[in-house]
Image (spheres, rainbow, N blue to C red):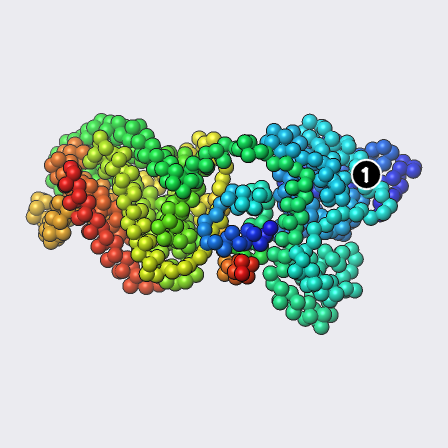
Amino acid sequence: MATVSQVPGTPGARRLTIALAGQPNVGKSTVFNMLTGLNQHVGNWPGKTVEMRSGTLEHHGLVLDVIDLPGTYSLTAASPEEVITREYILQERPDVVMVVINASSVERNLYLVTELMALSCPLAIGLNMMDVAAQEGYTIHPEVLSEAIGVPVVPMTAARGLGVHEFLDAAIEVAQRQEPQQVNRPEIRADHRDVLERVLAVIAGFVPEPYPADWVALKLLEGDQQITGLVTDWLPTPAWEELQDVLRAHEDAIVAVASGRYAWISQVARAAMTRPRAGHVTITQRIDAYATHPFWGLVVLAVVMAAIFGLTYAIGGPMQGWVDSAVMGPLARWTGAALAQAPEWVRGLAVDGIIGGVGTMLTFLPILVVFFAGMGFLEDVGYMARAAYVMDGFMHSIGLHGKSFMPLFLGFGCNVPAIMGARILESRRDRILTIMLAPLVPCTARLAVLTVLAQAFFPDRAVLVTVGMTALPLVVLALSGIVIRKVFLKNIQSAFIMEMPLYHLPNGRTIGMTVWQRTVAFLKKAGTVILAVSVVVWALVTFPGGDVDSSYMAAVGHLLEPVGDLMGLSWRSIVAILSSFVAKENAVATLSVLYGVGEQGSGLRSLMGTEFTPASGLAFLAVEMLFIPCVATLAVIRQETGSWKWVLVNVLFLGLLALVGGIIVYHLARLWL
Amino acid sequence: MLEQLIAILASGELATTQDLASRLSVSVELVEQMLLDLERGGYLAPVTGECDRHCTGCAQASSCAIMGSRRVWRVTDKGRRLAGATSS
């Protein structure tokens, strides 16, 4: 088995080829560097852009050529690295493959070992990072592992130089054995053994060297495209057709092959390794015991959101007040004075239209920046995935199945991807229902408007109002879910699997980038959509007579008065809500323009008590949270449903919901406030 | 092992990789490898890349589940068929 060759100039010295394999980040490079020192050559694998490192060393009178194979998790031919690794081992037949595995992640690393065993190459295993495994509470018995696999296993801590030479000695011993290595390979699941035998029987005699026929058979059952392609060339047509028949009849054989592998891994790991005891729980597990608990998780979510809003108001509130009184107020007065000689409409446009609309919205930038930072923090530390998980549990408990989870989850960012996320639902009926409900998930823009107005209207109870108004559309969504469960989505089972990131310390740069991106997006919106709508609204409330009550807007607005009366809202408030159809933030800008906030320089806060009562203020917020989505979302609804009919249905559904919601909130609030 | 995982998925709940690892008594990393195998076989599909031109330049793209790094899979029809066959 071992190749023995003469090294020129070193009579009698034997030459062995050693390949180093392992998954990424297992310390393989450390081992390679320790073995070869400065005698390294770096190039590329032939025809590939993947780096190839090789080196030579002399050890106990032997000359060893060491090839550092690319780090791969498996050998499925899914990446160039995987193809290089398996092709090298098959074609070059190294005398031994030294596999470096991570002792703190034995199970995952054994996966690669199972694939290497299938290639029938001599193996030696270096169990690296023993120190890390011990710190994490693992107890591993290398001798048991070795016995279970049938391959030498050498414990190492390569970073401290421990065990590397013993690993090399063990590998050389394997390379020099004359008899083939007897390894305990995983077997295909019992119910598919006959299928494997049939495949082997069909390909027998057609598989050329150096490919092992049993490995080729396994790869065919796994649907490996590279091997299937090769076999197409090797097999005569009748045999190929017979093979196709077998493979087609057992298309789930990949599960049987993989299952055998996992059963083997689980068995070997259980025999050779003791996991951290129950007492040895990680920080993530400790936090998640509450953060992902069906009940406490919701409490944690409410507390976390309240804390974010509380912090937003505590830090951003005073800054907003300062920007309003020290910057925007004087700017409005200065602009008014500077344009004293200009035509009245020019002054009005600048002070009432632009400063009143966009300017007022911009005074809330400090609040939004703190809010964005808070949300960025939650995302960065890994909490948002838990929030989504807890919300799914809640939705599930009230009848909305996992099917709708993804679109709803996405809706918290923006309703546009939420509507598109509904594509993952197979049935058109489910898709349409989810699309109709998705706008009820409060998007960032809606939350921004809520954050701003709650602070302006209810400065003393802003956190309570914000949390309550965030919950309102979700409660409506939940109630809709119950109806939908009863009427439409009966017995629909579907599953999602989600990767939960580990909690980690926040990275200031990442959070800074999130805040920056969202702030820039907000400013862009302020400079375009909000500015345009503010100017249009200003024009409509100014012309033809220069007086709001005789303006074009008033003429239309008075028609809306009966609707507003039901919720204690003036026609101006209704117009502000309608303008949020273009972009949610316009609600704030339009309110400012309609009430001449810019001119008075007194901010939106002055509207409470004069234009709004606490009850009508709450009704305004409720309507804003339930109202039809922005135009971009409706455009996507048209695109995804392929019909204007569903856009109209959505507008009517949410319009009616907002009206009913506003009326209920107004009358309930009047009872208590 | 993989059959147990599929049986759990057949229950139709949202599962996290941590849940699955603890129910199968294996490491989270091994569950991730299993998910990759099931994805390779077409039993699971990653929920990614659904976003098109609407998301270009979106300020939330970095934190969005579609565009971001968070990984979510859904069970495909093929996966459901297998789960049904396994559980029956």
Q: Please state which amino acid type lies under the numbered disc 1.
A: Ile
Quadrant of residue A243 within the rendered picture = bottom right
Residue drawn at (29%, 59%) of the image: A647
Viewed as shown, does residue A2 lie left or right of A108?
A: right
**Kind of element beneath mark 1:** helix
Residue A212 % position (x, y): 76, 56
Quadrant of residue A188 within the rendered picture = bottom right
Counting the numbered discs, the total is: 1
Residue A234 % position (x, y): 74, 65
Of A583 and A411, which appears nearest the observer?
A411
Mark 1 Cα-neighbour bin, 10 Å: few <14, some 14–19, many ≥20: many
Viewed as shown, does residue A333 lie left or right of A269?
A: left
Residue drawn at (64%, 49%) of the image: A263
| Farthest-out residue, bottom | A238
Of A237 and A263, which appears nearest the observer?
A263
Residue drawn at (71%, 65%) of the image: A198
Which residue does the numbered mark 1 point to in the structure image?
Answer: A172
Which chain's residue wears label 1? Answer: A
For the question of whether residue A404 can be seen, the reply is yes
Residue drawn at (85%, 42%) of the image: A176
Residue A125 % position (x, y): 73, 39
Residue A540 % position (x, y): 15, 48
User: Vertical placement of A650 versus A105: above or below?
Assistant: below
Quarter of the image with the C terminus of chain A is: top left
Viewed as shown, does residue A399 lie left or right of A610?
A: right
Quadrant of residue A27 within the rendered picture = top right
For the question of whether residue A351 can be seen, the reply is no
Of A377 and A559, which appears nearest the observer?
A377
